[in-house]
Image (spheres, coloured by chain):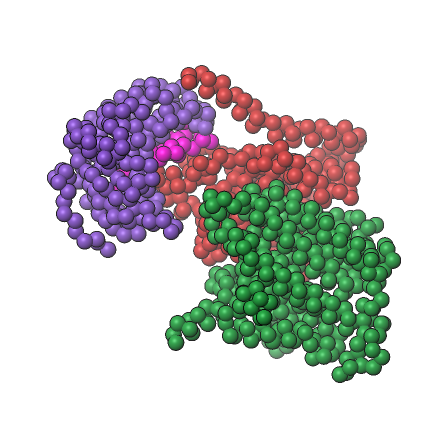
Chain colours: A red, B purple, C green
Amino acid sequence: MSADDDARDALPQARLALIPPFIVLAIALAGSMLIGSTSTWVTLTVAGLAMGLLIFIMASGLTLVFGLMDVMNFAHGLFIALGAYIAATVIRMLAPAAAENDLLSNLSAVAPALAAAFVAAGLLGWLFERVVIRPVYGQHLKQILITTGGMIVAEQLILVLWGPDLLPLPRPETLRGSFVFGDIALEKFRLVAVVVGLAVFGAMLYVLNRSKLGLLIRAGVENREMVEAMGYRIRRLFVGVFAAGSALAGLGGALWGMYQESVTVGIGAHMMVLIFIVIIIGGLGSVGGCFVGALLVGLVANYVGYLAPKIALGSNILLMVLVLLWRPQGLYPVSKS
Amino acid sequence: MRPPARAAQPSEPRVAEALLELAGVNTHIGHYHILQGVDFAVPRGGITMLLGRNGAGKTTTLRTILGLWRASAGSIRFDGSDVTQLPTPAIANLGIAYVPESMGIFAGLTVRENLVLAARNGPLADARLEWIFRFFPALKKFWFLPAGLLSGGQKQMLAISRAIVEPRTLLLIDEPTKGLAPSIINNLIEAFGELKKTDTTILMVEQNFHAARTLGDTVVVMDSGRIVHAGTMAQLAADEPLQMRLLGLSLEVHQ
Amino acid sequence: MMHSLLSGDHPRSRALAAVLVAIVAALALAPFLFPGTRPLDVAAKVCVFVLLVASYDLLLGYTGIVSFAHTMFFGIGGYGVAIAMARLEAGWTALAIGIAAALALSLALSFLIGLFSLRVKAIFFAMITLAVASFFAILASQLSELTGGEDGITFKVPEILRPSYRLLEEPLLGVTIGGRFATYYLVFFASLALFLALLRTVNSPFGRVLLAIRENDFRAEALGYRTVIYRTIANCLGALVATLAGALYAIWLRYTGPNTTLDFAIMIDILLMVVIGGMGTMYGAVIGATLFVVAQNYLQDAMKLVSGATRDLPLLPSLFHPDRWLLWLGVLFVLSVYYFPYGIVGKLRLMAVARRLRQ
């Protein structure tokens, strides 16, 4: 067995890893052919990317938590909802600054709203991990039950605190409307969502690939026991990763609420189905897979929503089934030792 | 809970200050009582071989020492301190490195990243790396490639390199030659031979009797969760009937 | 006789037996004990949900599978009956056809889901069932031609079961013996029979294998039991009984719609009932369903009182608002998982054992 034989094996694997991004492009192209009008295609594609990236922000924490801690948090939606509600409340308090037609004033309203959503969800996540999750490590059945129960209680508490009515979450003045290029109208807020989403992805990639913390997380996802045997107290990371994942969910929820321009208590639960689809498609534990999966889901939802609205909601579930038939472990399964 | 004191076995060497001492260690996994009162000591320096038939409890012993499985009774002392109830990272940080039977390679991380992670006390020391590359040149070649692409033998080399990338007091190694080609096994034997000359103590589980006989200074034999023999390798190698009785095979047999 | 009726699975606790007898008696004599539409409605709902939750306990408590698709099978039963009765001549034949079609569809779906997903981790399976159930709910609301969309389907039942029908001209013991009466007893006896059948199933050799698989599936596999097959059979059985429960519920309501059968809230309710009642006991379904349905209908009135009484205090009125009854049940649910993993039934049995040990 020579070393060269092994190097040759390396290439097919690398090629396989490039296929999923090509699928995204393929879908975009298919969309352009089916949709016909370029302007509509551009609008839908931007909408799809924006939606996909927002889902990515919300889903990335969940997949990482599962990969590292072997915990599936069915209550993840509550961090999304909390983020949205807190952002709505803060923006309402800073309404004058949000209403002004000046970017800086708007930012002085939006930034605190997003920051508050991020921090509040992160704190709640920290608390949740210690109180709810920690007692049921390793017991998957109990985890599913407890987190589902936690979700119910949290939803009800949100109704207690904020009431059952729909809460408006208006976009700040300068982020309303669209940039117009000839036929094509690009919603400003969607572009913001794309930028923020890419920034979050970039930051995550940086931390995961260029820092010792990221190294620990990636190794821990593969083989937690071995990392401990190498002298690292990886359990201390758990609460941090959980809190970070929850904070991201809160941020995503706030942005999603602004995207929809309204917030209801069901916002979390509604996203959970899509988020599960995304992380299953991407491969549980893989941030890259989550990214690709989210883009796929976003594009498919928007294209099908235009082409065949009746099956739009079901199309993503069909997508998941197709992906699983091809790769039962998802697009980028994490090799668990 | 200490078991009643046993009479010392005639072949037990008089140990001055053992690096690692197990006394009356019992381990239960679920309903199964795997270790049923393990007593032995690992002397400082050199290689102690842990031999025995399949299912004797050798891997369980290593895992219990490292705290991956909790001893239900008995005590484990390492370098003077009681480590029986310590969490695994704490035990590892006392200076123990572990090479499991499954190698424990992080397939998604590069060779370099695997070693960086293993070097928990600071950056990779060049001298050390040179030494490692001398024995395992493939690692230098695959430095920036994901470790999952390495062959079985190369993965084992990486696993061992991780354990020695920084000086450690004790190495726990579980069947390093398992499933490897003879040429690679000889490579490993050479490397371990070099390692013996340093301060590091090694406790190694091996089924390859040739490797065991070549490398081992002390030997401990297990059967059904208990120690049935402890002594020097020289003693055991000279006593073929004893070998047949304990292991069912002669140490001369090449695996 | 009791021994064989209960398939040897006794309550094992005097308190539990007493409660069970009380519940069964109340349900058996409901038209006579609780006159009025609302109480009879509650009683019928209890019967249906006892059956539905018991079928879920087969999956969760005995086989260790968490599925979020149970309401889908409940809905298939309801829609099967509704579509058949609405499209065909509203008689017993149509009813039979509807139920048969529903059972066939449920069998096929549960078989496919089982074979595909039961090979994978529990969490994966749970998520997949969630997605499949959502898909089905979407399908039901989109194919409004067939399913009546969001509004559902109202239909006529066979003549004997119609409210206007009279079996006896004069009321007996103050109760009108007519269509509602007949329908109620159809629901009651069918639920009872199916419940006892489930009890028989879990106490059979098949049931014991399921328990072995739940405890340690590696060991069961090593002992020669193909766990995938057993799990799939359990999955199918649970689905079939849920379908029948759905059919019964549709017959009672003379209506089927997405909010009475497919709503995810109902799935959550089932989880609450089975955990609070006691997983893996069957009797837990009886206790849990009774507690839940009664609370759903009458607890809210109690909460309204408390909410009104605390009107001037901060936060409390909202916490006790009748719409927030699910909050308290949710808290009870979470506490049950932590502290009473065997639910009310388990607790009663433990207390009985403790009492026996002390004697």
Residue C304 visible to the viewer: no
Q: In the rendering, at what x and y percent does residue B133 appear?
A: 33, 21
Q: Is residue B110 magenta?
A: yes
Q: Indicate whether C35 appears above or below B235.
A: below
Boundaries of the magenta span: B93-119
Taking the spot 28% from the left edge, 44% from the top edge, the residue there is B225
Q: Quadrant of residue C332?
A: bottom right
* Residue C156: image location, x then y, percent: 84, 63
Which image quarter holds the C terminus of chain C?
Answer: bottom left
Q: Toward the viewer: A220 or A79?
A: A220
In the image, taking residue A243 as reference, residue B180 lies left or right, namely left
Residue C8 appears left or right of C263 = left
Identified at 69% across, 60% down, the residue is C245
Q: Position of residue C282 (x, y in %)?
A: 57, 63
* Location of the N terminus of chain C (image quadrant): bottom right
What residue is drawn where x is 84% and y is 61%? Answer: C91
Return the residue found at the far right: C89
Residue A286 seen in this snapshot: yes
B248 or B147, which lies in front? Answer: B248
Give above or below for C189 relative to B214.
Answer: below
